Image (cartoon, rainbow, N blue to C red):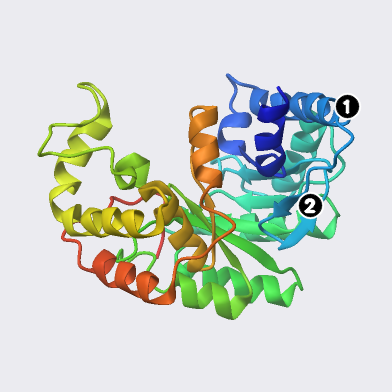
Amino acid sequence: MKRACSILGLCVNFLLSQHKICSSLEKKGRAEILLGQFEKRYLSQISEDESSIPFPNFVFGKQESVSPQQVATKFAPYPWRISRSSMVNAARESLRRLDQEKLALAQLHWSTANYQPFQEKALWEGIADVYDEGLCSAIGVSNYGPQQLLKISQRMEERNVPIATAQIQYSLMTYKDPLTSGMDEVCKDMGTRVIAYSPLCLGLLTGKYSLETNTLPPPGNPRRQLFTELLPGAKELLNLLEAVSIETGKTQSQIAINWTICKGGVPIPGAKNLKQAQENLGAIGWKLKDDVVEELDRTAKSISKPMIQNIFQTK
């Protein structure tokens, strides 16, 4: 149990709660309720150990001892959320379910610019109101490309509301994607951190899958067909990851995750079990050499077929 808590001590500080799911009529915010319950149990368990477990605050860049979890909640732009007050109400409901006074990060889940542009301004004003009313420590966006990010940043600057994060699908398999190309530079200029979801490209970058050995996700799994299409064009990249893995003594997963950190991102890889969580944590505390990062950049830009993008991703 103590071993598990040590792992949690490094992970628990920043938890993502997708409001798209939490606010659905079926779930009724179940994920946020569970997170709130988890925090109480975790802090109670960890307090029994006299040693304080320091862990990083990846978004805001500090080192802290055990403290209440930081929850980042996404607010989905449902069709009925057409007023700025609806965002404030959603934030208050999230806090009630979490049993917290303030969210660490309130995020707009995606932009409606491509299909319902009139709603976009209400969402912007609403998320800024959430910040102004002290319901969150920072705001962020998700699935915004560099062009749309610049647009919202202009309005947030007028309201003196900083955009702390921009969450996008970000990995070596999406690095050449034109929808998100240039996000590194835009976020750096704005002082915004990229939150990189799916940094392992659904597991493709782990090195566990191969067409040559017919090592693929099981039949019926949608990743099987996807990987069948992506693996041929990713062969050079996967070979490079394997070579760097041998040279550094790190796993291919750790190298792929560390690359996102070297690019200034905050990776949020998935983990199905404790072993995977431990492996993911092995990606921090060290850094790839600059020449290796550059070689990975070049190879990532040369892949013939990048990972498909989220349908809500904007330019």
Please provide percent x and percent y for residue 162.
71, 69
Q: Residue at x 10, y 39 (%)?
A: 212
Please tell me the numbered disc located at residue 4. none
Q: Is residue 311 visible?
A: no
- Residue for badge 2: 136
Please provide percent x and percent y for residue 246.
32, 54
| Contact? badges 1 and 2 (CB < 8 Å) | no
Task: Indicate whether 64 appears above or below 96.
Answer: below
Residue 200 as seen in the image, left or right of residue 52: left
- Residue for badge 1: 48
Q: Earlier in the sequence, mark 1 or mark 2?
A: 1
Q: Quadrant of the C terminus?
A: bottom left
The 10 Å Cα crowd at callout 1, few under 14, some 14 to 19, many 20 or more, is few
Foreground: disc 1 or disc 2: 1
Q: Quadrant of the N terminus?
A: top right
Depth check, front residue: 2 or 86: 2
